[in-house]
Amino acid sequence: MNNINSVEINSSTLAKIGANRQLLISGEDGANFSIIIATSEGKFYDFTDRSFSLGHTPQKVLKSQINGSDFQTVISFPSVTSDINYDVIVIPGDNTQFAEDQIENIRIEQVGNSVVTFSLTTDNTANYEAFPTSVTLEGSSAGGSDSVVFEYTVQNKNDNTGGFGLIINTTQPVTANSVVFTTTAAADGGQTSDLILLNSVDNIAVGSQATSLTGSPKILSIDGNTVKLTSSVTVTDSQVITFKSIGQAVISKATGMGFRLDDCRADPATFPTTTVRGAVSNSNAVTVNGTRGISGGSVVVFGGAGVDNSSGNNINSVTASETQGSFECDVNQTLVANTPLSFKTVDPSKVLCNSILIRGRFQVDVFPSSDLEVSIDLDTFITPGTQA
């Protein structure tokens, strides 16, 4: 009886593009065997044309033997569009057996590409015009990286509800910790506890926040499908819970994706200006030819020919209009009609603007196993202006 001592082939996950891999069978001279390679789609490898297809033919069973100490052949794994498994099966022939503890079936996984969408997000949608088109990267979790340079211009909303400018915090850098990933899971049963059973914990990790629950508690630990939160909550059966993972470390734990955000910055692109509408005589109510981008709330001051800034002169409230409107300030003003006015924040570390250019490089070092979207959270470094 002749022994087959080992069957070797690289069984690491195949990328979408496929690859050629060597199959090595070692053992005693004369050991004979049959090789069959099957896919999870029910196809078999044709050793003649080196392709996979449905049906059984003699070309799909390779019968051979060891001459000397080993047998070698190359298997061609094709490119794919979706995930697939291959089973490499070696069957001993007449007067041949496997040596002890040998495996005759080796499984190889092949994964299709996943698409990562890189976008912008905010909780203050009423203060922005529609965001620019997101960028995407495509790659395989089996290996490989890719990057894209992006330039997003965001604009303050041109209406009377949200058109009070955008205020950049220049001390808050835009880094990978400004990136967020959001997913949902459903409660498995009604519960009041800090331990919540979910239907799935896919794409959720320790540190993710349950932002749709009171207090946005964080996940402290995960045991099976049960998450322990930082505070007790009440949920109903099948209630959909939104989980947000914030920053590079938590997102990577939740999704398996490794990424970087390099050389990212946010710069003011345009600034609010207007002119005095009609003469203003000893009044703290300044009428203007449009208020777009001007914030109330005592966070902005203004300047121009004849403006009295002899003492603190914050803009406290705005009566909004695209072509007219007014604002109220601390100090009474006497101004000539059509005087140009400019505006800046009280806090010198912040900048008031109408639009902002956000640019940098987004790189995925390890692609996730499925499509997902991550976003720069504008709220980490931009505060919308307010009416009052």
Image (cartoon, helix red, strand yellow):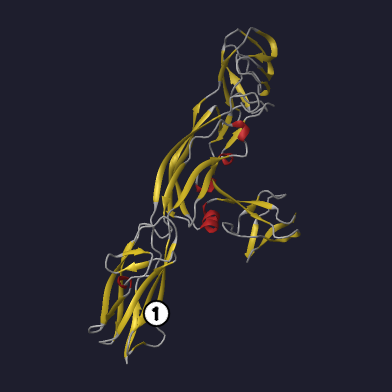
Q: Nearer the viewer, residue 56 or 20?
A: 56
Task: Give the residue drawn at x 43%, y 47%.
Answer: 137
Task: Give the residue drawn at x 39%, y 69%.
Answer: 38
**Mark 1 element type:** loop
Dot 1 amino acid type: Glu
Whether residue 173 is visible here, answered yes or no, is no
Whether residue 364 is visible here, answered yes or no, is yes
**Quarter occupied by the C terminus:** top right
205 relative position to 1: left or right: right
Q: Residue furthest left?
A: 68
Q: Nearer the viewer, residue 305 or 275?
A: 275
Q: Position of residue 261 (x, y in %)?
A: 46, 47
Image vertical order of residue 105 relative to residue 301, above or below: below
Q: Nearer the viewer, residue 243 or 87?
A: 87
Q: Nearer the viewer, residue 43 or 224?
A: 43
Q: Which residue is label 1 attached to?
A: 104
Q: Position of residue 81 (x, y in %)?
A: 41, 55
